[in-house]
Amino acid sequence: MAISPVVVLAVRSLTFVCLLVSLILITTNTITLPSSDYDWGWGSNIKFNDIYAFRYLVATLILGLAYTLLQTVFAVIQACTGKRVGGERFCVFDFFGDKVVSYLLVTGAAASFAMTRELKDANTDDGMDKFANKASVAARLCLVGFLFAATSSVFSSYALPKRA
C-alpha cells in the first residue's frame, strides 16, 4: 500500500507547524511574582527553563523540529520528482527515525502535563495559573504533533521493503 507523497508532505507539514507553535509558546512563557509569595529558589521571575520538565519539552521539540524539517524537505523532493531520496535504503531510516521522534515528543508532552498539573495544584495565584495554562497549551500542541508524527511513522512502515 503506497501513500501519496502529497499526503505525506501534508502530515509532515502539520507536525512541523504544531511543534513550532508549541516551541514558541513554551519559550515565551514567563511570569513575574512577588518574591514573598513563593520561596522556591527561583526569585520573582519564573521562566520555562527554571523547570526541568519544560526544559525537556523544549529539547524534544527542537529535536522533533529538526527531524521533521529534514523529512519535510525529502517529502517535497519526492512530491515534485516522484522519486524517494535514498531509495529503499532510506526507508528504514524514515521508519526508525519516525518512531524515535514520536516517542520523544510524547514523553516531552507527558512530562509537561504532569508539571503543569503540579503547578496548578500547588498554587492559587492567577499569574502562576496563567503560566501553567500556557505551558499546558504548549504540551497539548506537542501531543498533537506526536499524533501527526505517529501517523508519519505508520506511513513510513508502508514504504519498508518487503522481505520474506
Image (cartoon, rainbow, N blue to C red):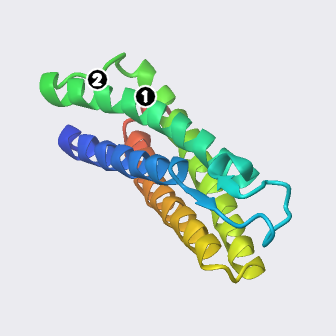
Of residue 14 and residue 32, the one placed in the foreground of this image is 32
**Inter-mark Cα distance, 2 to 1:** 9 Å
Q: Amino acid at mark 1?
A: Cys
Name the residue that disc number 2 marks.
84
39 is higher (above) or lower (below) than 150: below
Precedes in sequence: disc 2 or disc 1? 2
Structural crowding at the residue carrying mark 1, measured as other residues with C-alpha within 10 Å and reported as few (<14), some (14–19) or many (≥20): some
Kind of residue at disc 2: Arg
Query: Is label 1 in a helix, a strand or a loop?
Result: helix
Assess whether mark 1 and mark 2 are in contact (beta carbons under 8 angstroms).
yes
Image location of residue 157, percent across then percent down = 44, 42
The residue drawn where x is 22% and y is 23% is 77
Q: In the image shown, does 6 or 61 lie closer to the viewer?
A: 61
Residue 84 relative to residue 58: left or right:
left
Residue 91 is marked as 1
Q: Residue at x 54, y 55 (%)?
A: 29
Residue 2 visible in the picture:
no
> Which of the pair 127/15 is nearer the observer?
127
